[in-house]
Structure formats: structure tokens, C-alpha cells
Amino acid sequence: MRRDDVPVLIRRLKERYGEKYELYGSSENEQEGTGFRINNIPATFSVLCFGDIPIGRYDFQIESYPPGDYLYTGEKNLSGLLELIERYREPMDEWQSITFEAPNKWFKSFASLTGTG
């Protein structure tokens, strides 16, 4: 069964972010998943929609950019995912408050690089 979840997500990202949206390790033709970046957010987003994942839900992970550390994994509906992406537009020192699931190691590394910790 063909699902429209990924094309709907891509369309909404293009509407919201325009040229700031870019595919990352993915293509426009994929139906079961996509990877993308939003310029000025030092993170990558990977989304899957297939198998046991309910229609209208997005299984995703957010990873640091450059890659190396996982920041968040979860499952949300479209509006929840778009809201979460917006929160990652906040300054990086605010990211740890987004979720308790985010690995502290990444924030310690960030703090040592920026002198904020």
C-alpha cells in the first residue's frame, strides 16, 4: 500500500522553509523515508514511515551535524514533528531542554567547543 506521509512531509517542509530545506542522504522519490537538513540548524533529520508505523505518524531521529551524536529519537504526528523541528532553531544551549532523552555527552562536547560549560 502506497503511503503519502513522506511526500506530505516534504511538501510541508518546502512550504515552511523554502530554500533553507535540503535533502540529506535521500531523494525526492522516496516513499518510506527521507533525510533532510534545514540550513542554520546544526542537525540532520531522518524520518521513516512504513511497516508497523501507523499512518500519519513519523518515526524519526535527529543527529548532530556534522554527524556523530544522536540528539533525539521518537515518533510524532506531522504537526508534532514540525513543532519539534522549530524548537531546534533555538540557540544550541537551549537544546538540552527540548528533551531529557538527548545525550548529555553531546552537550558537554558543545560546551567545551563554545566555552559555555
Image: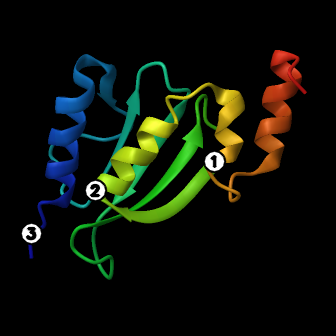
Q: Mark 3 is on which residue type?
A: Arg
- The residue positioned 15% from the left and 46% from the top of the image is 29
Q: CA distance from mark 2 to mark 1?
A: 19 Å
Is residue 35 visible from the viewing direction of this image? yes
The numbered mark at residue 78 is 2
Horizontal side of 45 relative to 111 (left or right) equals: left
2 vs 3, front mark: 2
- The residue positioned 11% from the left and 60% from the top of the image is 4
Q: Mark 2 is on which residue type?
A: Leu
Neighbor class of circle 1 (other Cα within 10 Å; few <14, some 14-19, many 20+) is many
Horizontal side of 14 relative to 67 (left or right) equals: left
Q: CA distance from mark 2 to mark 3?
A: 18 Å
Sequence-wise first label, 3 or 1: 3
User: x, y (%) of residue 8?
Assistant: 15, 50
Mark 2: secondary structure = helix
Sequence-wise first label, 2 or 1: 1
Image quarter of residue 6: bottom left
Horizontal side of 76 relative to 29 (left or right) equals: right
Asked whether the residues under the numbered discs 2 and 3 touch, taking CB atoms below 8 Å apart as contact, a structural biologist would say no
The numbered mark at residue 2 is 3
User: x, y (%) of residue 72?
Assistant: 59, 53
Name the residue carrying label 1.
71
